[in-house]
Image (cartoon, grey):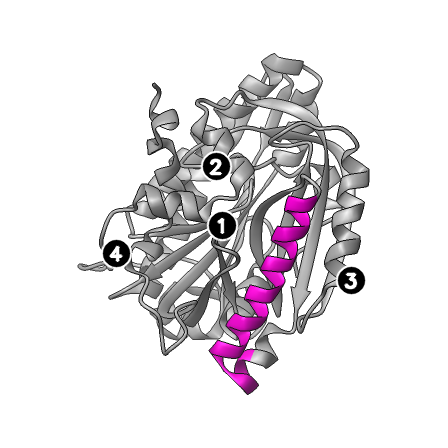
Amino acid sequence: MSAAAGGDGLLPYVPQLLTDWSPTGADERHMAVTGTLAFVDISGFTQLTERLARKGKVGAEEMSDLLSTTFGDLLTESYDDGADLVKWGGDAMLLLFHGPGHAARAARAAHRMRARLRVVGQLATSSGRVRLRMSVGIHSGDFDFFLVGDPAIHRELLISGPAATTTAQTEAAAAAGQIGLSAATAALLDGRLLGQPLLDGRLLRSAPVRPESSGTFGGSPSLEAARLLLPPPIRALLGAGPVEPEHRLITVGFVQYSGTDELLVTSGAARLAEALDEMVRNVQHACADHDVTFFESDINSDGGKIMLTAGAPRSADHDEERMLRVARLVLDRAGRLPLRIGMNRGHVFSGTSARRSVAPTRSRAMRSTSRRG
């Protein structure tokens, strides 16, 4: 039996944050963490995916190798500064730093990752050269994490509230090659490290000196936690053994929810936890009813997005029809949080790479459906 089949392959999917989950207040679904969040987005993979898709299986294997090498190198740089990978979005990462010097460590990690990408991101592929670039948004403050959803299906980790919004807005304002710092993060750094203004913050010009101490969450992830956090189709796929990389035609949907910032500020974390739990259960049950995969969630300004897939990781007939039925059902049962849904159909790369991911790497089919900011 392979490691994945035995369950060990699920462990990388558990953020270290969840090994020290300590509810803030009476609601066990909410935890506030003081630290720094870095939203890292890599551009260039869309072009690469489209080129290599024309080469069939050989192109998929090459894509898998390139992803693993690139993200493996970048994550190694971030882990050296105590990063916790809390979200993975195919070509984007959400990294949490907490403990002493969290702002300096986040800025240093981002600077080192950008420098590393300038080396490993000059890709000589069988379909020509591709240059990868990254934009980063960094914010420091009190972040509100929520662990919600039907435990009989899976629990989803969400980051919502004003601090998450500021992180998303800072990343959206940063151009390719730039590292944007919110005003709160910039205030925690030596002014000599700062560059030009960006929104109410600054661009990062130089890397901070590595702090003497760093914060990490304790404990080791358990198989039980891993199984609880993964949606059933993904859990089944990873548990069956190695995942074969491939380019495939799928239908993608994004459920965008909003209104989280005002609800948190005016009604408190417990009320927001209830609203998020209601929303996630709505999407989970609609997906289960129509054989669509609840794939992942992503932060967004004043809310977030849930990505749905039909045709990956499991193939089935009538992808578009099943996705449309899910969309209609979710909107009909919408609760307190306003919802919007977009969908598209196209070719994506699907496979595992670096620390984790069975995520379709974002192609034009996905980017035309999902826009951050």
Indicate the position of residue 359 as horizontal and vertical percent values: 56, 37
Q: Which residue is mark 2?
A: 235
Specify which label sits upstream in the sequence, 2 or 3: 2
Span highlighted in magenta in the image: 264-289
Relative to 259, 35 lies left or right: left
Label 4 to label 3: alpha-carbon separation: 42 Å
Circle on res. 332: 3
Label 2 to label 4: alpha-carbon separation: 27 Å
User: What kind of residue is marked 2?
Assistant: Arg
Q: Is residue 9 above or below residue 35?
A: above
User: What kind of residue is marked 3?
Assistant: Asp
Q: Are marks 1 and 2 in contact (CB under 8 Å)?
A: yes
Quarter of the figure with the N terminus: top left
Q: Secondary structure at mark 1?
A: loop
Q: Which residue is mark 4?
A: 216
Is residue 197 something one can see in this rendering?
A: no
